[in-house]
Image (cartoon, grey):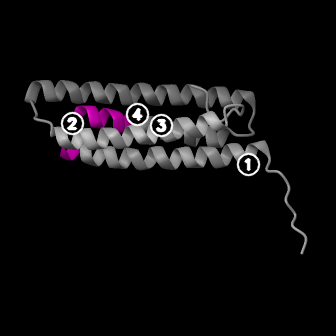
Amino acid sequence: MPCDHRPESPQRIQSRLLVALLAINASMFLLEATIGWFAQSTALLADSLDMLADAAVFAIALLAVGRSARFKTQAAFSTGVFQLVLGLAVAVDVLRRFLYGSEPKSSFMIVTGFLALCANLLCMALLQKHRSGEAYSR
């Protein structure tokens, strides 16, 4: 049987990259949000929201692959608005903890922060490998 091995299209490669990045960031969002809530850590909650924002950016970028420049511009604007809303949510949590206090659990913060660092390094390596595409430019 002959092996029909055609090269993948650039759009297919970008889509697969975005799906991988989305999965990494969405998983880390869930992990960090859960542990951040349990550990009473605004830092972990803020980083989990950053992971959520990145996941949203990758999801929107996935929708934008192969679309018009206008769609991509509108998608970029919407991700900026989404990140602004998440930033305001973190500010509200900081104010709440300032007014009512909390004692974060540092051991959870250290381990989870290290996992988040590993996830970010993995995403960076994947993006670096495919830097010639338009999958992600921030």
In the shown orientation, is residue 10 left or right of residue 15?
right
Q: Residue at x 34, y 49 (%)?
A: 31
Q: Residue at x 71, y 27 (%)?
A: 70
Tell me the number on the disc at residue 41: 2
Q: Disc 4 on helix, strand or loop? A: helix
Q: Return the disc, 3 or 2, that comes first in the chain's sequence.
A: 2
Q: Return the disc, 1 or 4, that comes first in the chain's sequence.
A: 1
Distance from Cα at disc 1 to Cα at disc 3: 23 Å
Q: Nearer the viewer, residue 40 or 127?
A: 127
- The label nearer to you, 3 versus 2, is 3
- Quarter-wise, where is residue 112 in the image? top left
Name the residue carrying label 1: 12
In the shown orientation, is residue 88 left or right of residue 41?
right
Q: Are marks 4 and 3 in contact (CB under 8 Å)?
A: no
Residue 2: percent from the left, percent from the top? 91, 70
Name the residue carrying label 3: 121
Q: Return the disc, 2 or 4, that comes first in the chain's sequence.
A: 2
Q: Nearer the viewer, residue 51 or 109?
A: 109
Q: Residue at x 67, y 32 (%)?
A: 131
Name the residue carrying label 4: 50
Q: Is residue 96 magenta?
A: no
Q: Residue at x 23, y 30 (%)?
A: 93
Image quadrant for the N terminus? Answer: bottom right
